[in-house]
Amino acid sequence: MKFLIIGSGAMGLYFAARLTQAGHHVTVLARPTSKEATAVRFTRGENTGTIAPLPIVSSPPPRAPDCIILATKVWQAREALQRIEGRYDARTPILTLQNGIDAPIIARELFPDAPILAATCVVHVQCTAPGALTLLGADATLLVGLFDAIGDAAPIVAAIDESAIAASLAPDIHLALWKKLALIASYGGIGAVSGLPVGVTRDHPETRRLVREAITEAANVARASGVNFTDADEEETFAIYAESFAPDATSSMQRDLAAGRPSELAAQNGAIVSRAATLGVPVPIHSFIYRTQLPREREARHQGPGAQ
């Protein structure tokens, strides 16, 4: 299968590397100012290798892909997709990998006739240099589902599953997206406010309770949005935080905010707060997280007071 991956950060390079190793034809579309390359350096543990041919280009390639994978940060999604508008078959499937619930909506707005495949992805990768990445831990687990009734996700899921990435069809992708959002926005938000890793926030009953209540707030917004987010789903989501994470774990949003980098605050806590306001659902914890972290986000983006 021919894949076009938009985004040359850690996630984009990881998917490009694993799909190339599985025999698929992959091209990575980087930013217009990026240096082009023909290979990726892949490190796992003590092993480092070069994966080629794997073209990394700075302008959309002429060859039409069978599937487009959007691997940018969520706030870059609209601009990234606009770069390929009108260049390929309007019915080319688009797979979104972003946290939160906004990326598939953006993709559907820009490509009304394309199958939009939303996904949740669990993997820990770092981009160590342009064209180089390190995989920390296990290979990715990918849950994929059609965002709406257009298209068929099964062939693309099967193609990705031929690689080291464990891809499967989600029985309810909207629930999967909301469960992940409830998890990362809650523990990541409390971590950002407190400046503490998971091991500390879950050991103290006060912060542990805040994370649990924040998950309930997000679940209530999901329910008001028509998603079947059950009490059991809440408990399962909280159990990941309470039982599965390493003590030193932090969310990517928390790390970005602490380092003064642009983060996914708007796409995580901000998305929950804005939808809650529209639906009339109280979300005091997420509102507190969003409002207290918004000045840090604005500073990272060099924006003044009042910017969203």
Image (cartoon, rainbow, N blue to C red):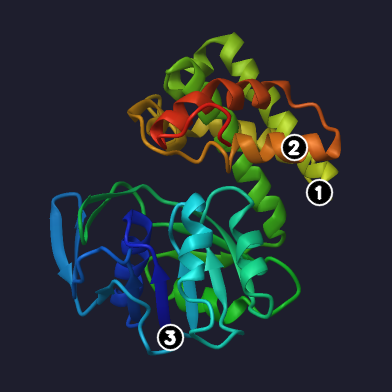
Horizontal and vertical percent position of residue 232: 75, 38
* Camera sees residue 257: yes
The amino acid type of the residue labelled 2 equals Ala
Quarter of the rendering containing residue 130? bottom left
Q: Which residue is mark 3?
A: 1
The amino acid type of the residue labelled 3 equals Met
122 to the left or right of 102: left
- The residue positioned 81% from the left and 49% from the top of the image is 228
Which structural element holds mark 2? Answer: helix
Q: Are marks 2 and 3 in contact (CB under 8 Å)?
A: no
- Could you tell me how far apart the alpha carbons at marks 2 and 3 are, in whole angstroms? 37 Å
Horizontal and vertical percent position of residue 217: 74, 30
> Residue 228 has which mark?
1
Q: Of label 1 and label 3, which has the lower sequence position?
A: 3
Q: Which residue is mark 2?
A: 219
Q: Is residue 71 above or below residue 68?
A: above
- Could you tell me how far apart the alpha carbons at marks 2 and 1 are, in whole angstroms? 9 Å
**Disc 3 residue crowd, few under 14, some 14–19, many 20+, Cα 10 Å:** some
Horizontal and vertical percent position of residue 251: 45, 34
8 to the left or right of 3: left
Pick the quarter of the image with the C terminus: top right
Pick the quarter of the image with the N terminus: bottom left
Q: Are marks 1 and 3 in contact (CB under 8 Å)?
A: no
- Could you tell me how far apart the alpha carbons at marks 1 and 3 are, in whole angstroms? 34 Å
Which structural element holds mark 3? Answer: loop
The amino acid type of the residue labelled 1 equals Asn
Horizontal and vertical percent position of residue 8: 32, 62
Towards the viewer: 60 or 283: 60
**Disc 2 residue crowd, few under 14, some 14–19, many 20+, Cα 10 Å:** many
Which structural element holds mark 1? Answer: loop
